[in-house]
Amino acid sequence: MELANIEKLVEKYLNAETTLQEETTLKNYFTEGSVAPHLQEYAYMFTYFATIKAEVYTKTIALEPKKSKRRNYKWLSVAASIVLLFSVFIGKQEYERYQALKQFEQISKGLRLLSQNLKKGEQAVATLYTYENTVNKILK
Amino acid sequence: MNQSDFLKVVLPFKDKVFRLAKRLLVSSEEAEDATQELFFKLWKSKDKIADYNNVEAFAMTMTKNYCYDRLKSKQASNLTLVHNNYKEKDTPLEKQLEYQDSVNQVHLLIEKLPEQQKIIIQLRDIEEYDFDEICKMVDMKPTAVRVALSRARKTIREELIKKHNYGVS
């Protein structure tokens, strides 16, 4: 391609009036060496554009892992809430059993105390009876 | 749409998405994360994709918006951008090195452009989309796209000339 033509295209290029085809022409001219010295800066630009386009995304695109991760969290929370419910239930049962035991002990202690005191009273009444009997005997 | 159909549609432009993300987010790692995230998003909305006649343009628009969001949150959390292909301009002895250095300069110059011009020059000069597609992707009028592109190209050229002191009239 002759230089005059390239210069015209470059002018259009700066004004963003070139078509994609014309830009390809420019790209070819400037990346294939032997550039006119007064157009050197375009060679830098087009070389840069070409090299940067060679850069690719090398990692594989993962579509699934995040999804399953999220599901795991969901199940984890469900499991945690079940465990919590269960432990609260068990704890409540244990607590009730303990309360009942305590109550039972208190009641039985009270009853024992009552029966002891009752025995004491009975003895006293028994002595009273013997006393009354002897008094009656003497008075007769 | 199953997984292999989906991949057949999206894989051809994965590199373009990646390069646009890298242009905006600068670091390769960020761009890789963004690409992965975008394709995951596309996969989730795969039912809608079937209705679009131009999935690629839609994906590029999504990329642009996603990167903008990333940049905003980055500014909010006050993280600094790191670019890894920056090279300090030393005094190269060989011409080959100097040439490579100037090519790298272009990268830095594009980095300094406003976001919008960055995207447009990426889409036009690197990915070679035609104007209609670019208008759709960036949601701008054709004349506005041309003005931005022209400005970007002129800025890069002028800066390059300034750097090299060619003294072109």
Image (tube, rainbow, N blue to C red):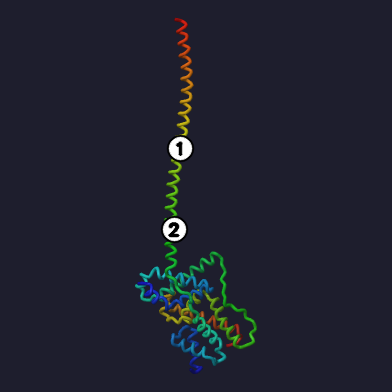
Query: Is B78 placed above or below B53 here?
Result: above
Q: Residue at x 57, y 75 (%)?
A: B84
Chain of the residue under label 2: A
Q: Nearer the viewer, residue A42 or B50?
A: B50
Between A4 and A55, the one lying in front of the other is A55
- Looking at numbered disc 2 in the image, what kind of residue is underneath it? Leu
- Location of residue B164 in the rendering, given as x and y in whole percent from the top left corner: 60, 85
Foreground: B118 or A70? Answer: A70
Q: Which residue is mark 1?
A: A101
In the shown orientation, is residue A129 left or right of residue A39?
left
Give the label, 2 or 1, closer to the camera. 1
Q: Residue furthest bottom?
A: A2
- Given the image, what chain letter belongs to the residue carrying mark 1? A
Estimate how packed mark 2 is, as few (under 14), some (14 to 19) or many (20 or more) residues with alpha carbons within 10 Å.
few
Query: Depth check: A11 or A129 in front?
Result: A129
Is residue A23 rendered to the left or right of residue B82?
A: left
Q: Is residue A138 above or below residue B122?
A: above
What residue is rendered at 45% in x and 28% in y?
A111
Q: From what the image shows, is residue B29 above or below residue A127? A: below
Residue positioned 46% across, 25% down in the render: A115
Where residue A87 appears, as percent x and y from the top left, is 45, 49
Report, in whole angstroms, how far the alpha carbon at label 2 lies from the one at label 1. Answer: 37 Å
Number of marks in the image? 2
Q: Which residue is mark 2?
A: A76
Residue B96: image x %, image y %?
59, 87
